[in-house]
Amino acid sequence: PITFYRKDYTAPNHRIKSTDLIFTLNPSRTKVESRLQFESWGETNPDNLPLELDGEDLELEKVLLNGKQLTSESYTQTASGLTIHNPGREGLLELTVYIQPDKNTRLEGLYVSNGNFFTQCEAQGFRRITYFPDRPDVLSQFTVTLIADKTTHPVSLSNGNLIEEKSLDDGLHQTRWEDPFPKPAYLFALVAGRFVCQEETIQKGDGKPALLQVWVEPGNLDKTDFAMQSLKKSIDWDRSRFGLDLDLDRFMIVATADFNMGAMENKGLNIFNTRFVFANPELATDVDFENVESVVGHEYFHNWTGNRVTCRDWFQLSLKEGLTVFRDQEFSADMMAEGLDVKQAESARAAKRIDDVKVLRAAQFPEDAGPMAHPIRPDSYQEINNFYTVTVYEKGAEVIRMQHTLLGETLFQRGMKIYFDRHDGQAVTCEDFVAAMETALQESHPELDLKQFRHWYAQAGTPEVFASWKQADDRLELTLKQSCRPTPGQATKPAFHIPVKLGFVDVASGNDMPLVLESNAAALHGDVLDFTQASETFVFTGLSKPVVPSLLRGFSAPVILHTAHNTEDLIFLAGHDNDPFNRWDACQKVYGKAIVDIYKSAGDTGSANTQAAVQVVGSLLQDAQLSDGFLALALQLPGEGTLLEAFEGLVDPVAMHFARTTLRDLLACTYAAEFNALYAERNLNGQPYEYNAIAASQRALKNVALSYLLAAGSEEELAIAQAQYAQANNMTDRMAALSNLVHTSAEKPAELADFFERFKLEPLVVDKWFMLQATIPASNENADTLQIIRDLLKHPAFTLKNPNRARSVLAAFAMQNPSVFHNHGGEGYALWADLVIELNTINPQVAARMARGLDRWTKLVPLLQDKARVQLERIFNTDKLSPDVREVIGKALD
Ligand code: HT7
Ligand code: ZN
C-alpha cells in the first residue's frame, strides 16, 4: 500500500482559474464535458511543467488543448490520472469522459439513489467524475450545465446561482448554474431527479433576500419543517455569535437515503443523509431532533469554516472539522439554553457538554489508545477516508475549545476575525489558525504564547493527569503530573499545555472558596490553571477550612484524570460540586468503581464502592433541586465502551456487561418505589408532543426511570412499558418502551412485530427496528442474539448496499453490543468478519468503518485475543481487499 506523508506536501504546478462542466445525465452512461482554464501556479515556475490531473474509473473520449486534439504522445493516462506534457504557462484544456453512475455502489463521485443522481466529492470523489487536480488547494470558479430527462429527472441542481433553465428537444431539459465563489473540487455537487421542496425567503444581515430550500423525494415534505427551522436558527446564530453571515442568494439542502456519512457541506448545496433531515414526532426521537439541528448547523457553519477558508491538504482536515464541530457544539448548547433562566440554562449547557464528553470517552479515547491512533493533524495516511475520525472531529473540537478556554470568548472571536481577515478565499493549515489565535492573545497579553499548546496538533494519545494534594495551615499544595503513553510512531512526547479549570469546594458550606495562588501566580487565569510541566506543584492560600478540590471542571482538557479523591470525597462532589459537569463526573466515578469491584469479585455487591453507588443514587433521587436533564444523566451508569477502555489490564467484555447489569439491578431493586414515583410524575402520556429542551429532558428522565423499573422486572413493570408503547404519541416514548421490552423481556414481545407493521414504509424507522434487535445484550438469556442477527440478514428489508441499513445491524452489533460481539465462542467475530468481507466489495469506505470493530483486540483477555486474531487475519488475507479495509486491518495486526 502507498503511504502519503504530510511532510511531502508540494504546491501544484498549475491553478485552474475556471471550470466549465456540462453533464448529460444518464444513469448507465453519463457524459461529462469539461473546459479548464489553467495557468502556472508560481510566476517563477518553469514553462514546461506538466499539468497533473487526477482521475479514476473514467472512460476518456477526447482531449483538446487550446482547441486542438492532442496526440497520445502529448499526454500520459494511468489508472490514477492524466498528465498533459508541456501544456505551457496557461491555456484551455477540454476533456470528454463517460462514467457509469448506476454501477457506483461506493457512493463516491456521481451515483444513483432511488433513480436520482447525487454526488459525494469529499475527499477524493471528484476524480471519479472527470480528470481534475482533485486537491483542496486548487480553487476554481465553477459553471455547471445539467442536461437531463424532463420526466424522470425534472429537478436539477448544482452549486451557486441558477442562471438559466430551458427545455431541449427529445424530452430533455437543461439548467445552468454559476457559483460566484472559487472552490476546491471536493465542494462541487450536483443533484438531479424527482424532488419537492419546502422553501422560504429570509433577509440577510445586509438586508438582501436569500432563498432557503429543503429538497426531498415526494411524500417526505411533512418531515422537513424542523430542518428548515434549524437552518434559519443556524443562520441567525452564526451572525449573532460569530458575526458571520450567509454569503449566497440561495442555500439548498437535499436529502438522500443512500449516503456514506452524515452530510456534506457543498457550497450552497448541502447534501444530507435523510437521517439528519427528516424529523417529525411520530418518526423521530428527541435525540434524532437534536441531531438534525446539530448537523444542519454543522454543515451550514462550514460555509465559513471550511468553504470560505479551506484546507491546504487533507492532513489539515481538523482545521475545518474540529473548528466546525466546536461551533456546532456551541450552537446546540446555546439553543438548548435559549429562553431558560440562568440556573436552568447552566444545567442545559452542562447536559450538552456531558453528552459530548461521553462520546469522546466512549469512542475517541479508545481510538487514541489503539492501532489507528493519530494526532488531530495526522502525519501520514494510506486512505484519507479512514481519517474522518473521532480524533480529527471530536478531539479536534476539544483542541479548539481549549483555545477558547485559554483566550476567553472575546479574544477567541478576535482570533476568528484575524483568521478570516488573513485567509478568506485561501486554502490554509492548522498552523495558520493557531497563529491567528496567538496574535489575538498577544494583542492583550504580549507575555503569553501558544508555542507549547501546538503539541496538541502533533501528538497522538490521551494524556493522563495525576492529581494529589495536601491541605494544612490555610494552604493547599496541589501537585499535578502528566504523561502520555506511546502511540504508533511516537514513543515519547513533550509535556502538553493543559488548561485545568478548578475550584475548591468548602466541605461545610458547599460553596466555592476564592482561588489565591501563591506560587507561580501567573499560571492562574480566573479559574483556569496553565499546567505545562511534567510535574508541577501549585500552592493555594486562604483555605483554613477543609475543602475538596474539583479539577478539570467542564472537562477543560481531553485528558484522563486520576485524582487522590477517596470515596467520601467523591460522594461529597456527587452531591455538592458547583460545577455540574464535575458533579455528574463524580457520580460516574463512583459507579465505575463499583462496577469494577463487582467485575473483579465475580458478582459480589458488598464492596464499599458499591455501597457508595447506592448512596449516591439515593441522594440524587431525593434532591428536589436537580433539573430533569441533569438527573437523567446522573442516574445513568457509564457505558460499556467507557468501562472497558478505562479498565486497567486485559478485560472480558461479557463479564463487564454482567457486572454493570448487576449494579443496575441492585439500584433498581433498592429504589423501586422511587423510580415508580419518578416515572409516574414525569409521565406525560396523552399530552401533545413538543420538541424542546425541557420537555425532552422530562421524557429522558421518565425513560431512565422506566429502564430501572424493567430491570427490577416484575409483571407490573412490564405492563407499564407495554402501556407506554401502546399509548405513545411520539417516537421517543414508543422507542424507549420497545427497546426496554426487547432487551429485557422473556419472549419476543408482540410490540416488535407491531412496530415493523406500523413503520415498514419508513426506512429510518425500519433501521431502528433492525438496530434494536442487533443490540439485545447477553443478559437477556431468552434471546439468542447471534441467531437473531443471522435471521435479520436474511430479512427482505435488509441490504448491505444502503449504508444506514448496513450500520443498523453491523455497527450496532459490533460496536454497541459488546456482550454478544465478544462472546467466548468467537462466533460474534466470525459473523462480523463475514460481513466486513462482503461489504468490502460493495462499499469500501463503509466497510473500513465497520472493520474498526476489533481495533482494541489487544486489550481483551487472551482467550478472546486468539479468536480475534483468526478473524482479523482472515479479513486481511481476503482477495481484492480495498486499500480502505487493508489499512485498518493491517494496522490492527501490526
Ligand atoms: N465534510 C463532510 C465529510 C464527508 C465525507 C468524507 C468522506 C466520505 C464521505 C463523506 N461525506 C461527508 C462532512 C462534515 O464533516 O460535515
Ligand atoms: Zn464537518
Image: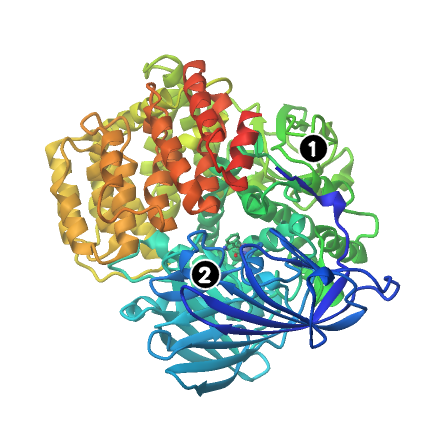
Q: Secondary structure at mark 1?
A: strand
Question: How far apart are the two marked residues, 2 and 1, measured between alpha carbons?
Answer: 69 Å
Q: Secondary structure at mark 2?
A: loop
Using the image as rendered, state which of residue 574 and residue 272 is in the foreground: 272
When the figure is inspected, residue 807 is found, relative to residue 251, above or below; the finding is above
Using the image as rendered, state which of residue 843 and residue 640 is in the foreground: 843
Quick one: label 2, few (<14), some, or many (20+) residues within 10 Å? Answer: many
Asked if the residue at tag 1 contacts the one at tag 2, i.e. Cβ–Cβ closer than 8 Å, the answer is no
Residue type, numbered disc 2: Gln
When the figure is inspected, residue 203 is found, relative to residue 185, above or below; the finding is below
Which quadrant would residue 562 be assigned to in this image? top right
- Regarding residue 417, the answer to whether it shows in the image is no
The residue that appears at 49% across and 76% down in the rendered structure is 146
The residue that appears at 13% across and 33% down in the rendered structure is 747
- Regarding residue 688, the answer to whether it shows in the image is yes
Q: Disc 2 marks which residue? A: 100
534 horizontally vs 721: left or right? right
The residue that appears at 57% across and 53% down in the rendered structure is 326
**Residue 468 image point, x, y percent:** 63, 24
**Residue 4 image point, x, y percent:** 67, 43
Question: Closer to the camera: disc 2 or disc 1?
Answer: 2
Residue type, numbered disc 1: Phe
391 horizontally vs 403: left or right? left
**Residue 6 image point, x, y percent:** 71, 44
When the figure is inspected, residue 81 is found, relative to residue 651, above or below; the finding is below
Which of the two labelled residues, at mark 2 and mark 1, occupies the earlier sequence position? 2
Which quadrant would residue 608 be assigned to in this image? top left
The residue that appears at 61% across and 49% down in the rendered structure is 401
Q: Disc 1 marks which residue? A: 540
Using the image as rendered, state which of residue 572 and residue 312 is in the foreground: 312
